[in-house]
Image: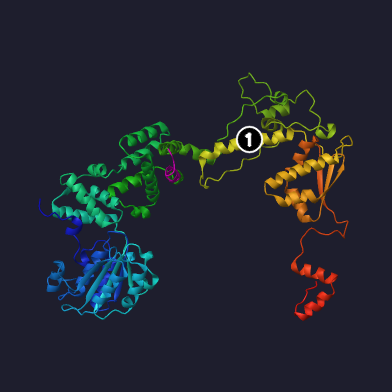
């Protein structure tokens, strides 16, 4: 079989110029090398597979290069570069902090820094995954990292910068690596495919780059996998099938079928996607991204935000111009909400089907919300006044005049109904149609609704109408109920003992609920009865407020005593000024009362140098 080397190792960059997508870092490092202003410690941080360790190795090789190029690149021809490329360099040391993270490992590294290199100028120590060092190892490394020997240079690499101590960060020159753009990864994959003699479509390479999510190493691994699976030929369809990626054609079809306002076609499309082995929640995630791309393509200056091929960008631009921004924005909102709901849904497909039905009727819902014509017109009931106001149909060929004009020319024979002031009877409320035909005033102009307000949730309008209808019926039912007359009724006689027993029973229930304060108020207060009026005295306004908030007390008394029109009144009894309060004394008040009863307490106060505070 031979010694096969994966593309991530075979095509690892060996110069700064061959590093993909990190020019902001490589240019800075080359400038520092040429000017001789290298720091003693560097920290490379960023996502996985973006070139942190690669740049650290190129920097270490360039520092000891004997024939550095004018651009600051290692020559790869001198003895130092050749020894490093062959893995025989004694000036460059690599340490994996994930497996060497103890204090002893750091002590051994510090011990090695004392030796001056026999060849070259600097000893470079590359510590990968430095965030894996223990707390004690970090502390042991601080002094050496701050003031290393002149011939030592440290390069730290990590994917989790936030886990490193601030004292370590302050001693390093920090470089933040960024995710590599899709086009940069695709172009690099195309270069490798040309070198390897692999026939491929550029759209397939772009799809691999999208799947890699900005990591070049992941993209190279996927590239090797697809090349071996497809026998050296990469097509867009094969890549989608092997990577289990849903074709964006389905998303374009979904938006096109929204215009038909037939949700059956969208449901069948979802079933087709599920039959191919894709999850419904994955489809709604992709659909959300599709609507985002359409919103981005609404303006020409934002098209560059799309990371896809030029042909697909043109399709996005064409479809985005076919839909208004209001529909795209609401569709994006619906899909994002469905994406959130499917994460916790027991049946994600039902959630996705619901959002597809909403998308099918989204245009109608938006127009309904803007025009305000969503209310169902009730069937008009003809009343006696309608018959008097509306004239009979004419049989002549001339067009009929307006009802207002006919009413003015031929007034009704029956006398008008008496006004409410004359009869003291509430006048009936005329229907809207009657007012419009009998009144001589012009109709009130309708208020124009603003169409610039975005539609927050069009599909809740029906629920709001139902809730409003229920509230109106409940209010009308309350108005129909006869109110209870809470006035003194001389015919009612209540036994005070029975009242006190009922109050004590209610107090015991409060104790079971651990509401001791209210129970104590009911047991210590005094009750007076005047037929169906119950008055209860308390000591202060605080206790009165507690009783006012207890809304279950009076209904309980009415039920147990059998007096529906029983009403109560809570008042503060301040007639007896000498009555002792049940509020406990404070320490100063206790001392004051004791001093009034025992005069020798004042002498005791002087002996022990204490004092009593009198207010």
Q: What is the residue that sits farthest to the right in this orientation? A: 490
Quadrant for residue 168, please give it.
bottom left
Residue wearing tag 1: 470
Q: Main secondary structure of the magenta part?
A: helix
Q: Position of residue 353 (x, y in %)?
A: 42, 36
Along the line of sight, the residue nearer the viewer: 499 or 154: 499
Q: Residue at x 58, y 31 (%)?
A: 376
Residue 405 percent coordinates (x, y): 69, 29
Residue 225 or 211: which is nearer the viewer?
A: 225
Quadrant hosting residue 124:
bottom left
Q: Nearer the viewer, residue 18 or 414?
A: 18
* 170 sits left or right of 9 in the view: right
Q: Position of residue 174 (x, y in %)?
A: 33, 70
Q: Provide the residue span drawn in magenta.
A: 336-346
Total numbered labels placed on residues in the image? 1
Q: Specify whether residue 61 is painted magenta.
A: no
- Crowding at dot 1, Cα within 10 Å, few <14 / some 14-19 / many 20+, comes out as few
């Amino acid at each position: 079989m031979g010694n096969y080397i994966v593309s991530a190792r075979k095509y690892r960059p060996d110069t700064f110029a061959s590093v993909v997508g990190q020019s902001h870092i490589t240019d800075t490092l080359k400038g520092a090398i040429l000017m001789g202003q290298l720091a003693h410690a560097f920290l490379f941080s960023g996502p996985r597979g973006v070139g942190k360790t690669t740049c650290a190795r190129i920097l270490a090789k360039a520092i000891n290069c004997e024939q550095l190029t004018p651009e600051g690149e290692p020559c790869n021809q001198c003895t130092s570069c050749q020894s490093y490329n062959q893995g025989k360099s004694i000036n460059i040391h690599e340490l994996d902090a994930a497996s060497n993270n103890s204090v002893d490992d750091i002590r051994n590294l510090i011990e090695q820094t004392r030796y001056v290199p026999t060849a070259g100028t600097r000893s470079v120590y590359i510590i990968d995954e430095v965030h894996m060092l223990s707390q004690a190892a970090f502390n042991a490394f601080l002094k050496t990292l701050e003031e290393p020997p002149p011939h030592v240079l440290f390069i730290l690499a990590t994917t989790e910068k936030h886990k490193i101590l601030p004292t370590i960060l302050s001693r390093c020159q920090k470089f933040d690596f960024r995710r590599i753009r899709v086009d940069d990864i695709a172009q690099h994959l195309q270069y490798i495919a040309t070198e390897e003699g692999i026939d491929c479509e550029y759209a397939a390479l772009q799809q691999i780059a999208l799947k890699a999510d900005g990591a070049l190493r992941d993209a190279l691994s996927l590239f090797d996998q697809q090349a071996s699976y497809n026998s050296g030929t990469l097509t867009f369809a094969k890549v989608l099938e092997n990577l289990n990626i849903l074709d964006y054609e389905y998303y374009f079809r979904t938006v096109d079928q929204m215009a038909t306002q037939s949700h059956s076609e969208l449901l069948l499309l979802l079933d087709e996607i599920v039959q191919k082995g894709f999850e419904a929640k994955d489809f709604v995630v992709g659909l959300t991204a599709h609507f985002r791309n359409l919103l981005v393509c609404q303006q020409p200056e934002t098209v560059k935000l799309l990371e896809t091929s030029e042909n697909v960008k043109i399709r996005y631009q064409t479809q985005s111009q076919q839909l208004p921004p209001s529909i795209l924005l609401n569709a994006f909102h619906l899909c994002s909400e469905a994406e959130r709901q499917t994460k916790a849904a027991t049946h994600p497909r039902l959630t996705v089907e619901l959002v597809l039905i909403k998308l099918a009727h989204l245009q109608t819902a938006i127009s309904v919300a803007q025009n305000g014509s969503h209310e169902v017109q009730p069937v008009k009931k003809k009343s006696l006044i309608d018959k008097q106001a509306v004239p009979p149909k004419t049989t002549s060929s001339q067009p009929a005049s307006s009802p207002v004009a006919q009413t003015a020319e031929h007034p009704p024979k029956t006398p008008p109904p008496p006004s409410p002031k004359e009869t003291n009877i509430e006048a009936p409320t005329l229907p809207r149609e009657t007012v419009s035909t009998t009144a001589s005033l012009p109709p009130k102009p309708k208020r124009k609704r603003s169409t610039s307000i975005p539609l927050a949730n069009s599909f809740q309008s029906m629920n709001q109408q139902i809730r409003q209808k229920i509230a109106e019926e409940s209010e009308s039912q309350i108005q129909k109920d006869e109110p209870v007359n809470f006035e003194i009724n001389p015919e009612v006689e209540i036994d005070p003992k029975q009242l006190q027993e009922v109050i004590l029973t209610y107090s015991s229930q409060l104790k079971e609920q651990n509401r001791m304060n209210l129970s104590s108020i009911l047991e210590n207060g005094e009750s007076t009865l005047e037929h169906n009026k119950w008055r209860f005295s308390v000591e202060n306004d605080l206790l009165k407020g507690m009783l006012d908030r207890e809304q279950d007390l009076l209904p309980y008394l009415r039920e147990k005593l059998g007096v529906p029109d029983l009403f109560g009144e809570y008042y503060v009894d301040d007639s007896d000024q000498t009555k002792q309060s049940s509020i406990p004394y404070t320490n100063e008040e206790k001392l004051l009362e004791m001093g009034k009863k025992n005069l020798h307490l004042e002498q005791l106060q002087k002996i022990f140098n204490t004092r009593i505070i009198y207010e």
